[in-house]
């Protein structure tokens, strides 16, 4: 594993720093450090414009192969870009689901027709994507999905019926990738399909979910025979689980680099306030700040380790299976540290009726980190069974 950067990599860093200094200013000054977890509702239109500016500068699809429109950047260069992006205060990416999840999945599993149709819009920052995985009865247990897909021979289309929940930014998205059951008699991970659906159609109803933060980044999405062309299923019917697991591999892979840089900004904000209000003089707080700093560095080094020599199909090394458990616990603890650093001010909102500051939103949002994307308990089972090859946990039947 490389922990240092070559001269060529440092030249790339200089290019990134220069471009960000020239472009993340003026009309985009207001969105610096905005749009991260718990703040995704902020400056939506401005951040969409920023996505298009990133494309014009050649900074989208950074790690995608050149033949698919990307820049073909190495892991080291992707680390550098995300480091400098965070250091410059780059906003949370509106297009991250498309660029880091949908795009790599289509490159790995999609047909040439699908890549030609969908990849350019993702790169240009014009087509935003959301993820149709979780359902009321299928969260950590993704294989329990109930959403159905039936093929209408007369129309030559798949018709999708069911419900998804906790769908990030569905109300802003043009497309959604959906896991649905193509075989009504199937159970578990068999008989699933991976579908690419246009969101702007009569059979889709998006309902925002208001959270503790007072914002609505997440949504319920209802499908009532929503149409999907026969050419817009990735892989064959019944192969959806393989594609879905590949996508989750990308979610645990390079996409984590940008996430970590947002964490760095949040940590820096907590540290700044602790120094200004004197909380850093408290030995207990100071120790927790040091622990958070060390944890963030460990997270970075482990990411570089797990990404080194990774496959192109989203599959990751066994050590990658600890990543979700590690970052979710670290981030939750950072939220609690932020409140303790603020002290009594953490109980005072910025304005009526429920206007929270960044750290208050961070605290409330991080309560969910150890739940969504697989609870901490589920993650420990995954580590035990898949990484350490321990006996599977006994599972009962609901019948």
Image (cartoon, rainbow, N blue to C red):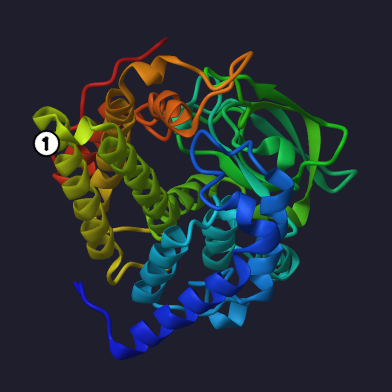
Q: Which residue is mark 1?
A: 287
Residue nearer the viewer, 173 or 136: 173
Would you say 193 lies left or right of 314 here?
A: right
Residue at position x 71%, y 51% in the image: 46
Foreground of the two, 71 or 82: 82
Tell me if residue 129 comes above or below residue 77 in the rendering.
above
Image point (63%, 13%), residue name: 353
Residue 208's x, y, as percent? 68, 24
Q: Is residue 182 visible?
A: no
The quarter of the picture where residue 49 lies is bottom right
Q: Is residue 186 left or right of residue 56?
A: left
Q: Quadrant of the C terminus?
A: top left
Q: Quadrant of residue 289?
A: top left
In the image, residue 359 sits, relative to residue 294, either above or below, namely above
* Image quadrant where one finds the N terminus: bottom left
Q: Residue at x 19, y 46 (%)?
A: 295
Q: Is residue 109 left or right of residue 6?
A: right
Residue closest to the eye, 51 or 63 = 51
Whether residue 29 is visible: yes
Percent position of residue 127, x then y: 73, 56
């Amino acid at each position: 594993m490389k922990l240092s950067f070559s001269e060529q990599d440092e030249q790339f860093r200089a290019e990134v720093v220069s471009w960000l200094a020239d472009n993340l200013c003026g009309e985009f000054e207001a969105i610096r450090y905005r749009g991260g977890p718990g703040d995704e509702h902020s400056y939506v239109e401005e951040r969409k414009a920023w996505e298009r500016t990133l494309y014009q500068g050649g900074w989208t699809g950074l790690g995608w192969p050149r033949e698919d429109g990307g820049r073909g950047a190495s892991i080291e260069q992707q680390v550098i870009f995300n480091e400098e992006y965070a250091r410059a205060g780059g906003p949370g990416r509106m297009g991250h689901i498309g660029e880091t999840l949908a795009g790599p999945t289509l490159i790995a599993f999609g047909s040439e027709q699908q890549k030609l149709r969908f990849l350019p819009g993702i790169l240009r920052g014009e087509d935003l994507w959301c993820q149709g995985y979780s359902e009321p009865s299928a969260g950590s247990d993704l294989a329990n999905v109930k959403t159905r897909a039936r093929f209408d021979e007369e129309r030559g289309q798949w018709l999708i019926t069911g419900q998804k929940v906790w769908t990030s930014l569905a109300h802003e998205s043009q497309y959604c990738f959906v896991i649905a059951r193509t075989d009504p008699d199937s159970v578990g991970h068999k008989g699933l399909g991976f579908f690419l659906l246009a969101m702007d159609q009569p059979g889709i109803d998006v309902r925002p979910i208001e959270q503790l933060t007072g914002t609505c980044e997440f949504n319920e999405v209802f499908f009532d025979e929503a149409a999907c062309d026969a050419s817009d299923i990735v892989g064959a019917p019944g192969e959806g689980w393989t594609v879905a697991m590949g996508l989750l591999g990308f979610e645990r892979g390079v996409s984590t680099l940008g996430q970590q840089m947002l964490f760095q900004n949040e940590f820096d904000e907590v540290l700044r306030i602790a120094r200004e209000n004197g909380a850093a003089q408290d030995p207990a707080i100071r120790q927790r700040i040091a622990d958070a700093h060390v944890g963030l560095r460990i997270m970075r080094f482990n990411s570089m380790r797990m990404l080194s020599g990774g496959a192109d199909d989203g599959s990751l090394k066994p050590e990658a299976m600890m990543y979700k458990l590690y970052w979710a616990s670290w981030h939750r603890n950072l939220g609690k540290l932020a409140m303790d650093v603020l002290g009594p001010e953490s109980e005072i909102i910025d304005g009526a009726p429920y206007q929270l500051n960044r750290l208050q939103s961070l605290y409330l949002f991080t309560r969910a980190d150890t739940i969504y994307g697989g609870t901490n308990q589920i993650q420990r089972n995954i580590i035990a069974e898949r990484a350490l090859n321990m006996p599977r946990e006994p599972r009962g039947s609901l019948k």
